[in-house]
C-alpha cells in the first residue's frame, strides 16, 4: 500500500461519514469536507455530522425485515452509524429510533477521533483532484457543486417529482389480471389489472377522498408538472379523467370476460428479473397507509406487497444505471465514486450502506485489489444491483426491500417465514464472501 495516497470525501452526512471511516481505517489520509456551519442547506440546522433531517427512525430492527437485514449487514462491514444509533436509541417499538442530536453528536466524535481522518468545514464548489474522490453530497447538494456534477455526468436530475409505487410480482392475483400489450403490439411487457364499473367507482371515490402526505418546507412548490402529475390530482379533475388517461382500457380485451374492461391499471416491469412491477401513471403524494388502502381496491392488487410507496419530494440524483459500475465509481473515471441518495438509494441506512461500499471500493482501488461487490442475495448487493441495472430506463430512488433479492429455491407461502429465510441466506452468503476477502 502506498501511504502517500489521499482520499477526499465530499459531504458529512451518513454516507460521507461511513465512506470516510472506511478509507481512514484502511490507513489512507482522508479529508472529509462538510460545508456546515459555513453554509446550511434549507433542511439543516445542526453543525454536527450525520444530521437526520426528517424522521428520527431508522426503520425496523428485526432480521426478518429488509431494514433490519440491511443494518446487520452494515454491522458486519464495520459501520460507524449503526453502533451509534444503538447507543443513542429511544423507545420506538420494533423500530430503531434515535435521539437525533445525541446520534449526530456521537457520530461526529467517532469521526473526529479517527487519526487518519481530517474534517474541513468549507463548501466545495469544484470536483477536487485526488487519488480517490467520493461525492456524498446528499439530496440537497449546493447549486455550485450540482452544476459541476451535472456537467460531468451529462445530465443531473434535480427536480420535484412524484414517483409511482412498486409491487412484487408474486403478490399479484393473476386470476384477476392478464398479460397483453395494447392492440397486441409488442411482447409481454405489461400486466393489466381490469376493473368493472362498480369496482372503478369504488376505487375512484376512495382515491379522491384519500389523505395526502404533508410536504417538507424544502419540498414545497407551486403547481405540478403535467408529465408526472399525482394520480389523485388528475382524478380530482373529473371521474373520467384517469379512465381516459393512465387507466384507459383502449386496445385491451380481458380474456376472462371477452370484453374490454371499464378501466385498467397497467403494471410495467421494474427490473430485469421481472420480480417487481411499477404502477404505470400512478405517481402519487398520498400517505403510505392510504396508498395501501386505496390501491388495494383494484382487484388484482388486493393482497399486493408494496416494496416502494409513491413519493413526492425533491430528487437530486444521477442516472446511476448508465453512469456507475458496481463499485459506485463512474464507469469512465474509476477513481471518482458516488455515495448516498445522490446515487438513487432511498433512506438513511441505504445511504449509509452505499457510503460503506463506496469507501471499501476506494480502498480496493488504491490497494490494487479486485472490486468489493457484495453477492446479489444480500440487501447491500441487491441495492447495488438495482442502481446499476442497465435495463432500467425510468430510474427512480429505491430503498431496502426483500423484493429486490433473488427468489429462494423453494416456495415459502408464509411471508414472515420467507423473509426470515431470505435474511438467513443473505447473512450466510455475506459471511462466506467476507471470508474470501
Image: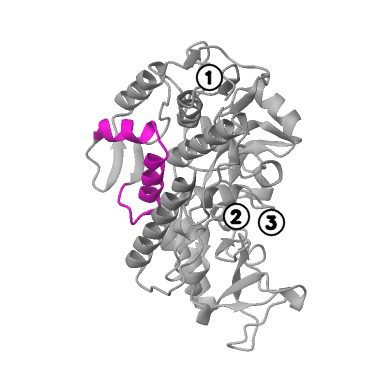
- Earlier-in-chain disc, 3 versus 2: 2
Mark 1 crowd level (few <14, some 14–19, many ≥20, 10 Å Cα): many
Residue ID for mark 1: 30
Q: Which residue is under mark 3?
A: 391
Label 2 element class: helix
Give the residue number, with chain letter if any, for mark 2.
234
How far apart are labels 3 and 2 at the CA level?
Answer: 29 Å
**In this rendering, the label closer to the viewer, 1 or 3:** 1
Q: Residue at x 47, y 12 (%)?
A: 37
| Rendered residue at 34%/61% (across/down) | 420
Residue 316, disc = none
Left or right of 110? Residue 379 is: right
Q: Earlier in the sequence, mark 1 or mark 2?
A: 1
Residue 393 on image: x %, y % = 69, 53
Seen in the image, is 97 located left or right of residue 261? left
Q: CA distance from mark 1 to mark 2?
A: 50 Å
Residue 189: image location, x then y, percent: 68, 69
Magenta range: 61-89
Identify the image quadrant of residue 161.
top right
How far apart are the two marked residues, 1 and 3, measured between alpha carbons? 35 Å
Badge 3: residue crowd in 10 Å (few <14, some 14–19, many ≥20) = few
**Residue contact between numbered discs 3 and 2, judged by CB atoms under 8 Å:** no
Mark 3 or mark 2, which is nearer to you? 3
Q: Is residue 222 above or below residue 232?
A: above
Viewer-nearest residue: 45 or 12: 12
Q: In the displayed structure, does residue 344 sit left or right of residue 408?
A: right
User: SS of the residue at dot 3?
Assistant: loop
- Which residue shows up at 62% across the image and 67% down it? 247
Amino acid at each position: 500500500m502506498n501511504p502517500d495516497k489521499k482520499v477526499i470525501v465530499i459531504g458529512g452526512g451518513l454516507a460521507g461519514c461511513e465512506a470516510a471511516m472506511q478509507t481512514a481505517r484502511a490507513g489512507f489520509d482522508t479529508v472529509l469536507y462538510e460545508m456546515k456551519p459555513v453554509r446550511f442547506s434549507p433542511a439543516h440546522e445542526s453543525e454536527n455530522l450525520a444530521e437526520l433531517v426528517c424522521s428520527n427512525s431508522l426503520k425496523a430492527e428485526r432480521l426478518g425485515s429488509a431494514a433490519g437485514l440491511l443494518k446487520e449487514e452494515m454491522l458486519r462491514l464495520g459501520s460507524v452509524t449503526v453502533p451509534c444509533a444503538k447507543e443513542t436509541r429511544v423507545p420506538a417499538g420494533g423500530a430503531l429510533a434515535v435521539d437525533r442530536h445525541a446520534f449526530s453528536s456521537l457520530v461526529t466524535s467517532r469521526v473526529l477521533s479517527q487519526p487518519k481522518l481530517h474534517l474541513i468545514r468549507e463548501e466545495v464548489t469544484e470536483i477536487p483532484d485526488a487519488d480517490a474522490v467520493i461525492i456524498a453530497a446528499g439530496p440537497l447538494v449546493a447549486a455550485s457543486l450540482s452544476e459541476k456534477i451535472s456537467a460531468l455526468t451529462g445530465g443531473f436530475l434535480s427536480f420535484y417529482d412524484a414517483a409511482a409505487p412498486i409491487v412484487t410480482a408474486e403478490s399479484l392475483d393473476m386470476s384477476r389480471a392478464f398479460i397483453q400489450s395494447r392492440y397486441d403490439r409488442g411482447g409481454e411487457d405489461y400486466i393489466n389489472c381490469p376493473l368493472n364499473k362498480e369496482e372503478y367507482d369504488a376505487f375512484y371515490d376512495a382515491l379522491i377522498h384519500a389523505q395526502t402526505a404533508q410536504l417538507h418546507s424544502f419540498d414545497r412548490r407551486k403547481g405540478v408538472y403535467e408529465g408526472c402529475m399525482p394520480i389523485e390530482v388528475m382524478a380530482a379533475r373529473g371521474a373520467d379523467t384517469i379512465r381516459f388517461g393512465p387507466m384507459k382500457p383502449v386496445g385491451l380485451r380481458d380474456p376472462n370476460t371477452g370484453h374490454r374492461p371499464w378501466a385498467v391499471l397497467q403494471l410495467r416491469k421494474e427490473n430485469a428479473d421481472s420480480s417487481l412491477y411499477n404502477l404505470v401513471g400512478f405517481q402519487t403524494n398520498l400517505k403510505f397507509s392510504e396508498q395501501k388502502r386505496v390501491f388495494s381496491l383494484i382487484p388484482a392488487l388486493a393482497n399486493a406487497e408494496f416494496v416502494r410507496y409513491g413519493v413526492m419530494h425533491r430528487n437530486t440524483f444521477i442516472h446511476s444505471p448508465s453512469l456507475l459500475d458496481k463499485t459506485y465509481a463512474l464507469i469512465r473515471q474509476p477513481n471518482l465514486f458516488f455515495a448516498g441518495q445522490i446515487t438513487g438509494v432511498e433512506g438513511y441506512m441505504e445511504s449509509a450502506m452505499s457510503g460503506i461500499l463506496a469507501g471499501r471500493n476506494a480502498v480496493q482501488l488504491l490497494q490494487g485489489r479486485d472490486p468489493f461487490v457484495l453477492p446479489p442475495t444480500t440487501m447491500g448487493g441487491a441495492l447495488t444491483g438495482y442502481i446499476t441495472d442497465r435495463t432500467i430506463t425510468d430510474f427512480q430512488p429505491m430503498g431496502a426491500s426483500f423484493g429486490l433479492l433473488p427468489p429462494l429455491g423453494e416456495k415459502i407461502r408464509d411471508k414472515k417465514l420467507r423473509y426470515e429465510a431470505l435474511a438467513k441466506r443473505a447473512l450466510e452468503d455475506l459471511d462466506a464472501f467476507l471470508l474470501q476477502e
